[in-house]
Amino acid sequence: MATQPSTISLEKLIAQKSDSYVITNKNTSKKSDIRHVYLRQAINGLEVYGTESSINFDKTGKVLTQHNNFLADAQATLKDNSQALNARAAIASVANQIRYSN
C-alpha cells in the first residue's frame, strides 16, 4: 500500500499541542531573524522516521517556506500498535544486549 504525502498545513499543526508531531529542533537566525522549526510526524507520541519536515517564518510570523513530509494517513502504516514487551522486559532486553550486569 503506497502512502500519500499530507496536505496539512504545518503552520496550523504546530499552533496546537498534539501527539501527532514532535518538534525536533527550532532556532532563529541572528542575521535574518528567520525562525526555523523542524518537526517529525508521530503516532501517539512515537516518532515516524522519514517524515522530517520544516517550516520557516520571517520576523513578523509570516510563513516563508515549508517542507512537509508527513504521511496523509500515518495510522494506516501501522501493522500492530500493541506493545510487545512491558517496561521491565524492555529494560532487561536492553541490559542483556549491552551485556550490563549489576
Image (spheres, grey):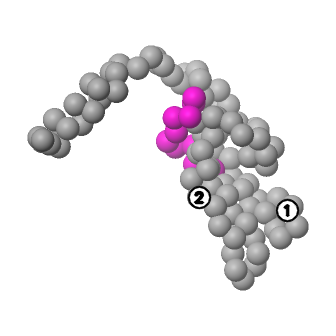
Q: Residue drawn 49% across and 42% down?
A: 49
Side of 49 where 25 appears, left or right: right
Query: Mark 1 is on which residue type?
Result: Gly
Residue 35 bears which disc, if any?
none
Tag 2, which secondary structure? strand
| Image quarter in which the C terminus is found | top left
Q: Which residue is mark 1?
A: 61
- Confirm whether residue 9 shows in the render: no
Segment colored magenta: 43-53
Residue drawn at 60 percent across, 44 percent down: 22
What is the quadrant of residue 36 in the picture? bottom right
Magenta segment includes 46: yes
Where is residue 35 drawn, in percent x and y? Answer: 73, 66
**Above-or-below relation of 20 to 62:** above
Quadrant into which the N terminus falls = top right
**Drawn side of residue 76 relative to residue 30, left or right:** left
Q: Position of residue 58 (x, y in %)?
A: 82, 68
Instruction: Characterize the local packing of mark 2: few (<14), some (14-19) or many (20 or more) Cα atoms within 10 angstroms.
Output: few
For the question of whether residue 19 can be seen, the reply is: yes
Provide the secondary structure element on which disc 1 rests.
loop
Q: Residue at x 75, y 78 (%)?
A: 32
Mark 1 surroundings within 10 Å by alpha-carbon count, few (fewer than 14), some (14 through 19), many (20 or more): few
User: Which SS does the magenta portion mostly show?
Assistant: loop
Which picture quadrant has residue 87?
A: top left
Q: Answer yes or no: do the residues labelled 1 and 2 have beta carbons within 8 Å?
A: no
Tell me if residue 51 comes above or below residue 67 in the rendering. Answer: above
Q: Name the residue that disc number 2 marks.
A: 25
The answer to if 92 sits in the magenta stretch is no
The numbered mark, 1 or 2, whose residue comes first in the sequence reads: 2
